[in-house]
Image (cartoon, helix red, strand yellow):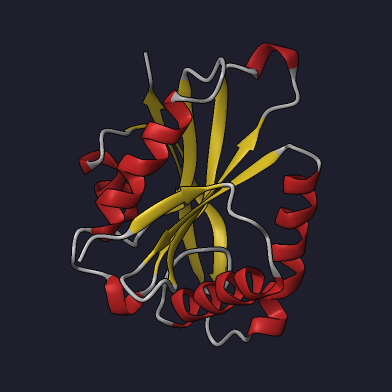
Amino acid sequence: MPLRFELDPETTPELLDSVCALWADVSNAGGAVGFVPPVAKDDIRPDLLRHLAAMTEGRTRLLIGRDEDGAVAATAFFTFNTHRLMHHWCWLYTVMVHPSHQGKGHGRALMAAAEDAARRMDGIQGIRLTCRGGTGADRFYEACGYKEVGRVPGAIRVADDDFRDDVTMWLPLN
């Protein structure tokens, strides 16, 4: 069953709890979304509240994907540049699909929905994102049309002796 995508959903307490739970589930399943397992919803909530504050200020937009039961099964956050020379592209952050929905094409559908949403945003001509090396995420994004444009070896430390590359990906929209 395909996900139904919605840009800028109403930010109810239920939605925020759902996004927080999704983020924890993805993190605890090994997803590279800013945390290392084990993580609890309370660990994630401050990051989510920062996203919410940026949404309130118009600097960030939220794209969600709902499953057939209406539950939040996927997310991506768009963040806009404040520098006047970089207004023509946006960042894509916290790209997640719930582990129970992975392997069904929902990740590609989420990326297509994000691309479609960005194409409708005034003046946006490209999407930039970063991912953690060693996870296969860079290959996934390449399959979605993104090109690797930079890599910083060992820039992400997930454990005292586990350093990963910070990979920058780019999707031109013109």
When the figure is inspected, residue 120 is found, relative to residue 167, above or below; the finding is above
Residue 45 occupies quadrant: bottom right
Side (left or right) of 154 relative to 10:
left
When the figure is inspected, residue 37 is found, relative to residue 112, above or below; the finding is below
Residue 147 occupies quadrant: top left
Q: Residue at x 38, y 34 (%)?
A: 115
Side (left or right) of 73 relative to 81:
left
Side (left or right) of 110 relative to 8:
left
The quadrant of the image that shows the N terminus is bottom left
Q: Residue at x 37, y 33 (%)?
A: 116
Q: Position of residue 154 (x, y in %)?
A: 51, 54
Q: Residue at x 32, y 34 (%)?
A: 146
- Which of the two residues, 27 or 154, is positioned nearer the viewer here? 27
Q: Position of residue 145 (x, y in %)?
A: 26, 33
Residue 152 seen in the current view:
no
- Which of the two residues, 41 or 146, is positioned nearer the viewer here? 41
- Which of the two residues, 76 or 83, is positioned nearer the viewer here? 76
When the figure is inspected, residue 149 is found, relative to residue 154, above or below; the finding is above
Q: Position of residue 135 (x, y in %)?
A: 34, 62
Q: Position of residue 90 (x, y in %)?
A: 56, 30
Q: How many marks?
A: 0
Q: Residue at x 71, y 54 (%)?
A: 51
Residue 24 seen in the current view:
yes
Residue 68 occupies quadrant: bottom left
The quadrant of the image that shows the C terminus is top left
